[in-house]
Image (tube, helix red, strand yellow):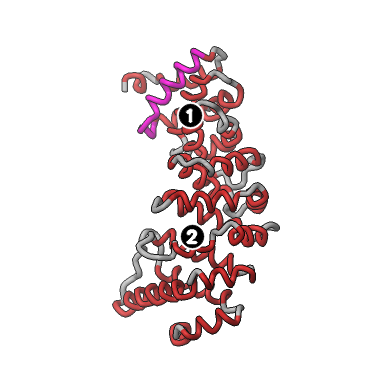
Amino acid sequence: MAVRLADGLQKMVPLLNKNNPKFLAITTDCLQLLAYGNQESKLIILANGGPQALVHIMRNYSYEKLLWTTSRVLKVLSVCPSNKPAIVEAGGMQALGKHLTSNSPRLVQNCLWTLRNLSDVATKQEGLESVLKVLVNQLSVDDVNVLTCATGTLSNLTCNNSKNKTLVTQNSGVEALIHAILCAGDKDDITEPAVCALRHLTSRHPEAEMAQNSVRLNYGIPAIVKLLSQPNQWPLVKATIGLIRNLALCPANHAPLQEAAVIPRLVQLLVKAHQDAQRHMAAGTQQPYTDGVRMEEIVEGCTGALHILARDPMNRMEIFRLNTIPLFVQ
């Protein structure tokens, strides 16, 4: 508190432009202690050019202790909405990505968490090819923290970015994401972003069809369909429905989807979500969000997936047999 009151931060941030690595390590350590949990300190660091200076250090130094202390400051700043774009615009994603192959586990871990925190504002960034490739490789690790960060970052960076989708698909990203889903078990922090990333990869880019086929060829369909079962969280179920819709665009996926009993599961979800939505409508209450998902979204998703699955005659028969016509009419 005394340091803050004496304008210590304003004096400290310019010291990041010195070039003595040991001195810089002490300075960044102090900045981390002052910024942690204190929004005002984070904004003072931003106003004094802190993000640019910190990214410069990550890009240009090799002293492990300095890189680690600097990555700790960036990790703290990466949860601040004002600092996030400044770090990304300064080239923070690329600078952090450089250290993902370091032999210092503590440095790698900080860089991964920081990349994940920044990735939702970095969807339009250029020059992330090497970062994306390393993140795909990280999916083969069995460490929960690594998988959480890598899947979360890949999910954000493949959102509405055709170039990134194509690059990840061409670098065995589908296979790696399926591996992550199989390893995750009941850990939604890994499964949900992995499914979202697969949903992005299977739609709207030149290699989308390759990705749709790759899910089948890597035995991903049974594991994905299983995720429709409750009591999985609604955001995961919603993402899975969207992925199944994309997979159904590939005719070769229809038979394995049918074998995995996808149609009864979608119909079951459709009935449940529709009844829930109707109940709120009858009571005249606005439908609440369940874990951030409205039941109308589930109804819409299931209907869309069944619509595409119905292109196949066998699937059409099964959808009809499950007495869905009255439901669609409603």
Q: Quadrant of residue 211?
A: bottom right
Which residue lies most toward the right here? 206
Residue appearing at x 56%, y 23% in the figure: 57
Pick the front one: 9 or 276: 276
Where residue 144 appears, as percent x and y from the top left, is: 43, 42
Indicate the secondary structure of the residue bearing disc 2: helix
Residue appearing at x 60%, y 55% in the figure: 160
Q: Which numbered disc, 1 or 2, marks the residue closer to the eye?
A: 2
Where residue 220 appears, as percent x and y from the top left, is: 54, 59
Q: Which residue is mark 2?
A: 223
Q: In the picture shown, does residue 94 fall above or below 198? A: above
Q: Quadrant of residue 277?
A: bottom left
Indicate the secondary structure of the residue bearing disc 1: helix
Q: Is residue 227 magenta?
A: no
**Could you tell me what secondary structure mostly forms the magenta stretch?**
helix
Pick the front one: 153 or 282: 153
- Which circle's residue, 1 or 2, is located before the other in the chain? 1
Which residue lies most toward the left here? 283
Where residue 171 appears, as percent x and y from the top left, is: 65, 47
Residue appearing at x 61%, y 22% in the figure: 60
Pick the front one: 154 or 311: 311
Q: Is residue 330 visible?
A: no
Mark drawn on residue 105: 1
User: How far, Cα to Cα, is label 1 from label 2?
Assistant: 31 Å
Residue 320 lies left or right of residue 163; in this view the side is left
What are the residue bounds of the magenta stretch?
Answer: 22-40
Q: Is residue 142 visible?
A: yes
Q: In the picture shown, does residue 326 fall above or below 72? A: below
